Amino acid sequence: TSGKKPSYHFSTTFLLGHPCIRLNDSSQLVPFLKPEFCTPDHDAMAPKLWVMSTQSSANISPLHHQRVKGREVIITEDPRLHLVWIYDRIFIKPLPRYLLSNAFWRVYLLDENSPLQGDRGIVMRSALGYLRTYYYLVQHESDFVLAQGAPLRLIAPDITWTQFSHFINQLGAVNNFAVLPR
């Protein structure tokens, strides 16, 4: 490696990692972000899902433990499949670069005057819940190496373990009421 630090500067033009999604065009941004994280059908079923599973994010096993359980990680871009497992497979949605941007959170998800307008709350709670799953999936540096390496590429290769740890550690204190039920 060259020792060069990743440049996660906030582009004022395009969504980080998605060069065709303009940040200043909510007619593009909202239809892109909602299906990236929102799962209304799962949220509607969530009160009944406790019969099949414990409703606690703490039950998400780290990546190294998924391997111990003999599960193959299958990449999915469908948020409805994120962390669904069947037999010896578990489906995991990769972590989009823009979700690791403090500026993206400040401008689009936390600001009351967000360009996402009325969709801000549901997108924020969905994205926060999704991001919090990575707090549990990547508990150790060995999990980070698995997540970042081939063939998974769940986390961008130019993010360091230290950067990721500092960002993701904030999510340990997020309670279940701050995210959507799924």
Image (cartoon, grey):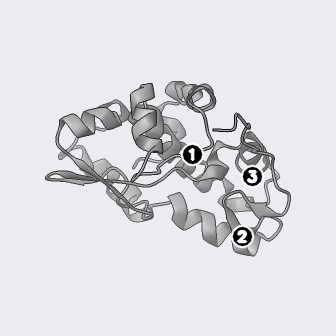
Quarter of the image that includes the N terminus = top right
The amino acid type found where label 1 is placed reads Pro
Q: Secondary structure at mark 2?
A: strand
In the image, is 94 to the left or to the right of 106?
Answer: left
Residue situated in front as seen by the camera: 49 or 139: 139
Q: Quadrant of residue 178?
A: top right
Q: Quadrant of residue 76?
A: bottom left
In the image, is 15 to the left or to the right of 59?
Answer: right
- The mark lying in front, picked from 1 and 2, is 1
Q: Secondary structure at mark 3?
A: helix
Question: Label 2: which residue?
Answer: 21
Q: Position of residue 2 (x, y in %)?
A: 69, 38
Q: Secondary structure at mark 1?
A: loop
Q: Position of residue 103 (x, y in %)?
A: 78, 44
Question: Label 1: which residue?
Answer: 157
Q: In the rendered structure, which disc, 3 or 2, sits on the residue that comes first in sequence?
A: 2
Relative to 176, say whether 93 is above or below: below
Relative to 144, say whether 10 is above or below: below
Question: Label 3: which residue?
Answer: 108
The amino acid type found where label 3 is placed reads Tyr
Q: Position of residue 3 (x, y in %)?
A: 70, 34
Residue situated in front as seen by the camera: 3 or 57: 3
The CA span between labels 1 and 3 is 25 Å
Residue drawn at x 57%, y 45% as measured from the top left:
157
Residue drawn at x 47%, y 51% as measured from the top left:
153
Q: Is residue 60 visible?
A: no
